Amino acid sequence: MHLALFQEKLTEKKVRCRLCNHYCVIGDGHRGICKVRINKGGQLYSLVYGNPVAKNVDPIEKKPFFHFLPGSTSFSIATVGCNFRCDFCQNFEISQAPVDYEPSGVEISPAEIVHLAKKYKCESISYTYTEPTIFFEYAYECAILAKQAGLKNNFVTNGYMSDEALKKIAPYLDAANVDLKGDEKFYQNLCGAHVAPVLNNIKTMKNLGIWVEVTTLIIPGYNDSREVFDWLIESLGKISFEIPWHLSRFFPTYRMSDHYPTPVEKILELRRKAKQAGFYYVYTGNIVGDEGENTYCPKCGYKLIAREGYIIAENNLVNGLCKKCKFKIAGVWK
């Protein structure tokens, strides 16, 4: 066990966890919603520090990041656990920790994670697959060492971390892809959370200089209606029309394995709608070969980056500018 950050001592050996927007009040011997932070004698501990259940070398496009070091690889790590309970989770085998979870296996130190990232010639470390917020202490120490080693750091996150946690990691966090899943009804019914903290954190990340991209998994009957999608357009547009927005096709999984996949036509329709609303960069996900995988100049329409799945087939950016009209394309290009 590793002493947890962001804990507030209460009476009767209770502790309030201030890591995320659930702000769990945890009694002695009990755990928070994530199941991987436990109160022992009035002290809060992380059960997952140094215990990654996944570590891989991934193309950065897989996260997905399309405006952050395109064509590079990222050393990706995750531990068990999540602070959401999404019925459609594609990584539920590792995200949904059992109530009696205990760490096992050989501990891997933050220094070793950075060493592996350098060894495999990655340009960044991705804290991904599950929810990086719940292994914050581990990610934070990795991120500090990564920056010292010349690597960048990114979170693939549900965006539910507390303001305190976000501001602590911000000096070391270069990018975040945040899931913006739906409206308040969607969050309450399918995730066990609320949407307002996610929108607030996207805005805060932008203000702190963290590069932000957003992903929305489009699930038929839940967040693909005109009312919900118009609300998403309005809410994200209030923050920035320059945020790259990935609209991904849903496939049945976990507790929604009896549902049906998102029709391709629906994703294409919503992409057109978002672009018409003023978003500069709107992408389609889980539709290999679609033009929505490519990056186009919002000023002249020139194809800047051609993608085939996770492969960069063509890159016409010159120092972050459109090769044709010299329009500045928002992103982190080196």
Image: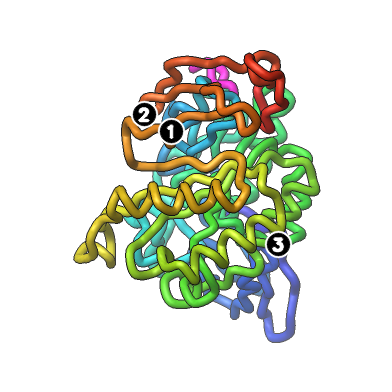
Residue 50 occupies which quadrant of the picture? top right
Amino acid type shown at disc 3: Asn
The mark nearer the N terminus, 2 or 3, is 3
Quick one: SS at disc 1? Answer: helix
Q: In this figure, which residue is indicated by the disc labeled 3?
A: 200
- Determine contact: label 1, label 2, CB under 8 Å: yes
Image point (67%, 54%), residue name: 202
Pointer 1 local density, CA inside 10 Å: few below 14, some 14–19, many at least 20: many
Q: Please state which of residues 315 and 276 is positioned toward the viewer in this rendering.
A: 276
On-image quarter of the N terminus: bottom right
Residue at numbered disc 1 = 293
Badge 3 crowding class, 10 Å Cα cut-off, few under 14, some 14 to 19, many 20 or more, is some
Which span of residues is magenta-colored? Answer: 118-123
Question: Quadrant of residue 150 in the image?
Answer: top right
Residue at coordinates 69% horizontally, 30% vertically from top-left? 145
* Residue position for label 2: 309
Pointer 3 with pointer 1, Cβ within 8 A: no
> Which residue is more in the foreground, 236 or 167?
236
Q: Secondary structure at mark 2?
A: loop
